[in-house]
Image (cartoon, rainbow, N blue to C red):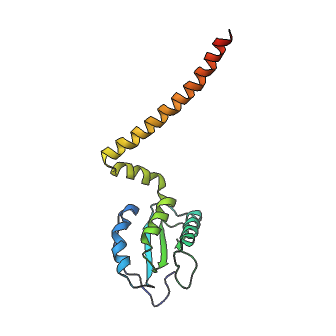
Amino acid sequence: MIPSGYKAVLVGSVASLEDLVSLRPVEEASAEGSLMLLQIDLGQAVSSSILQQIDQKCQAAGVEPWPWTVTYAWAEPGSTTMYVAWQKGVAWLPVIGGILGSVLLLPVLGIFLWWLMPESLKSTISDMVSTTIMMVMILFMGKLMQGVVSEGEKK
């Protein structure tokens, strides 16, 4: 994918997709039109359907591909390493991070966010869920009791 005359230069590495935010200043400091390349080691073989989803979502978001290709994500067949390439127009890394998160780690991301939330916010969300369940139960019991009361009045 990298044409002759170009070379990839490592400007940073992160341990997880959530840490991609730390690379945002590197992308923002790069000149407009710079070619950006993200290497992701997944630990399992990358399926073509995942690559297609990432391509579709990047295209829908308006991410600019490299000038000589229309593909954003690729991997060698059977490889556990995936690459995502784009041309810097605006800082696309947060958008691409969101796309990767939605395709690769959506369930894990929810758990991770819950783990990072302050206890007061967790409590508020838990209370809102409990209140909603109670309201549904009250509505259900009201409908149920209304039927019982109307049958009792008929007798």
The residue closer to the viewer here, 70 or 145, is 145
Q: Residue at x 48, y 89 (%)?
A: 4
> Which image quadrant is residue 139 in?
top right
Q: Image quadrant for the C terminus?
A: top right
Q: Is residue 30 above or below residue 122?
A: below
- Residue 87 in the image, given as x and y percentages of width and height: 48, 80
* Residue furthest to the front: 153
Q: Is residue 141 above or below residue 6?
A: above
* Residue furthest to the bottom: 5
Q: Is residue 129 above or below residue 22?
A: above
Q: Is residue 116 visible?
A: yes
Task: Answer with left or right where residue 75 lies relative to residue 124.
Answer: right
Q: Residue at x 63, y 20 (%)?
A: 147
The residue closer to the viewer here, 42 or 110, is 110
* Residue furthest to the top: 155
Q: Residue at x 59, y 67 (%)?
A: 52
- Residue 118 in the image, given as x and y percentages of width and height: 31, 48
Q: Is residue 47 above or below residue 84?
A: above
> Which image quadrant is residue 19 in?
bottom left
- Residue 98 in the image, given as x and y percentages of width and height: 46, 64
- Residue 69 in the image, given as x and y percentages of width and height: 57, 81
Q: Is residue 10 visible?
A: no
- The mark total stands at 0
Task: Answer with left or right where residue 4 lies relative to residue 119.
Answer: right
* Residue furthest to the right: 154
Q: Residue at x 54, y 74 (%)?
A: 62
